[in-house]
């Protein structure tokens, strides 16, 4: 069974724009917490780390 986790920063802050993460064997799953039935993205650990780094730098992601 896959366990999805929401950021502790968004869990109690009243934020509506949240994502959830899950470890999917050797991948990282990313999905919208408001629409989990819509599916998820599967990223390699390296791709996920690069995504997080770019978000922290506030870069545009094409």
Image (cartoon, helix red, strand yellow):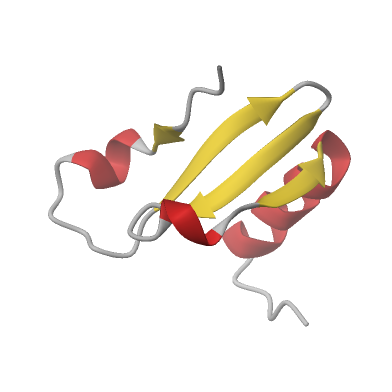
Q: Identify which residue is drawn at 75% across, 47% down.
A: 42
Residue at 47% over, 31% down: 4
Q: Who is closer to the viewer here, 34 or 17?
A: 34
In-front residue for pair 2/22: 2
Q: Nearer the viewer, residue 60 or 62?
A: 62
Residue furthest top in the image:
1
Q: Is residue 34 left or right of residue 28?
A: left
Using the image, determine if residue 59 lies above or below residue 27.
Answer: below
Where, by quadrant of the figure, is residue 51 drawn? bottom right
- Percent across and percent down for residue 26 are 84, 24
Where is residue 24 drawn, in percent x and y?
Answer: 71, 27
- Which residue: 29% across, 42% down? 9
Corner quadrant of residue 18: bottom left
Where does residue 60 sit, x and y in percent of width and height?
Answer: 69, 81
In this rendering, the count of numbered labels is 0
Left/right of residue 3 with respect to residue 56 in the rendered view? left
Given residues 33 and 62, the one toward you in this image is 33
Quadrant location of the N terminus in the rendered image: top right
Q: In this rendering, would 17 be left or right of 31?
A: left
* Residue at (46% x, 54% y) in the render: 37
Image position, residue 13 (x, y; %): 15, 49
**In the image, residue 60 above or below residue 55:** below
Image quadrant where one finds the C terminus: bottom right
């Amino acid at each position: 069974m896959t366990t999805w986790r929401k950021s502790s920063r968004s869990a109690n802050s009243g934020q509506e724009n949240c994502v959830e993460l899950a470890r999917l064997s050797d991948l990282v799953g990313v999905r919208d917490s408001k629409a989990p039935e819509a599916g998820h993205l599967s990223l390699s650990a390296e791709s996920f780390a690069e995504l997080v780094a770019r978000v922290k730098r506030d870069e545009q992601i094409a």
